[in-house]
Amino acid sequence: MKTGGQLIVDALEANGTDRIYCVPGESYLAVLDALHDSAIRTIVCRQEGGAAMMADCHGRLTGKPGICFVTRGPGATNASAGIHIAMQDSIPVILFIGQVASHAKEREAFQEVDYKRFFGDIAKWVVEIDDASRIPEFVTRAFAVATSGRPGPVVISLPEDMLTSIVEAPAALPHTAVETRPGEAELDALQELLAKAKRPFVILGGTRWDAGAVARMRSIAEAWSLPVGCSFRRQMLFDHLHPNYAGDVGIGINPKLATVIKQADLVLLIGGRMGEMPSSDYTLLKSPYPNQTLVHIHADAGELGRVYRPALAINASPAAFVEAFAKRKPASAPTWAAETPNLHAAYLDWSTPPESGPGPVQMGLIMNYLEKMLPDDAILTNGAGNYATWVHRFHRFRRFATQAAPTSGSMGYGTPAAVAAKELFPERTVVAFAGDGCFLMNGQEFATAVQYDLPIVVVVVNNGIYGTIRMHQEREYPGRVVATDLKNPDFAALARAYGGHGETVEKTADFAAAFERARASGKPAIVEIRLDPEAITPTRTMTQIRDKA
């Protein structure tokens, strides 16, 4: 006989949960009490949105569901930002929400929300557990749903009285992983298409990858001399210094690469959905009928043919597909082999940052320094904003599980993601990038880093504006500035107030020493870069954008 709260923790343990991220609430006190006697590590966060984003980063870097607990009403609605990210990014997350007691439902009780309606369009599955004896069933199913097919977030509502009820229930068993594998006929068909191709191109994306799958994909690219691109914010799927790497298929794509993809006669889309951002608003591959012969490999049959009609659809996870196809070899040297190194050379040129620009701080030189100094296994996180262009375009990712950034373009992600990354991999360097607007959306999670002694480095690129929106505003309504100016705190002083280390950089030459002091401090650190708002992109100033408009 156990309480519902104890059964929840038992089910988490049975499914391999080693840590959770939470903001405590009276609505799930019975779970918190059960966690007291559990080996599960409990990370208490400062706001539910940050907690949910930490759970997302956990799922993103490990492939295992990130677990988040929040209280009802405002706690759950705050967490919805992280659930939306996990849904659009195909990340396994399970969000547990304390709910009002059963007798109070449908009365608009204190903080009552209908979670099936609220989360219905931004979660993969939403359920409320009314009977504590069914907790093992529902929690095990949640792990299966979150990780199978196209991964995504599951939301479980927990009525308060259900958690305190004492029931007899079966012991929870771990969920059974579901794998989808390609058939030999499909592999034969793909090999035949490759044999006939003149200008093939591979785009890697999505989730359900691991380090072994990434290594096998590299072997496939080498055997077939295939040029490879990574979709938006999935850049850790291929070594950027490998001679087969052709570049990032995302926002602000290299025009030369865009032309190559449009002119390809065969595109292999492996793992990704090729949504609006990586497809350049559905222009690289036209929807619903691409000009290129499209081979789409995806773990969820529902994604095959959803946006694009593929010539060949392969219902398989990326890991299973590359394991199977790595055994296939070309019958003769591919005719396109000589061109693949040229595409890599074009990428290297595109990803070399400019060394000059407006203002006393040159982000290009800073990125050059970081490229030389950061180890290959450093984890980089970021949210959204023009500042992220410097990371996406100029950082050369080398290894799997080194990038955590939302493909949904959500702001406020970088800092909580860095906290989760450092918690997961304490031996690795973790650097978060944030704009001034982006940081202040979830910057309170810097306190979580301080509380758990997680020495992350947050690089805050402060230009005093909501930069991306100002750029669009100046292009569409030049000179008519509204709602995009920001008056910011002293971010270095803020870091010290939290108990961390703070640095301010106002000249390029000051960055290296400031960054090294931040790392050497052994504390969570903020390095604030005060960037001229004119330096709005690596290649164009705000004035140039306004004048062209």
Image (cartoon, grey):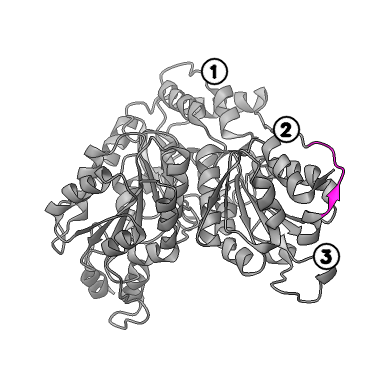
**Of the residues tagged 3 and 1, which is closer to the observer?**
3
461 w.r.t. 521: above or below: below
Q: Please provide the residue range marked out in magenta.
A: 165-171
Q: Which residue is mark 3?
A: 102
Q: Please state the horizontal and vertical placement of residue 238, each as a whole percent of the image.
A: 41, 34
Q: Which residue, as the protein is rendered here, is positioned at the far right?
A: 168
Which residue is pictured at 21% across the width and 47% down the height? 517
Closer mark to the observer between disc 3 and disc 2: 3
Q: Which residue is mark 2?
A: 176
Instruction: Quarter of the image for the C terminus: give it.
Output: bottom left
Instruction: Let me know if residue 120 appears in the view.
Output: no
Magenta region includes residue 16: no
> Which three-letter amino acid code belongs to the residue tagged 1?
Lys
Residue occupied by mark 1: 327
Please tell me which of labels 3 and 2 falls first in the chain. 3
Q: Secondary structure at mark 1?
A: loop
- Work out whether 196 lies above or below 278: above
Identify residue type, mark 3: Ser
Three-letter residue code for mark 2: Thr
| Mark nearer the viewer, 2 or 1 | 2
Q: CA distance from mark 3 to mark 1?
A: 56 Å
Where is residue 264 shown, x and y percent of the image? Answer: 44, 40
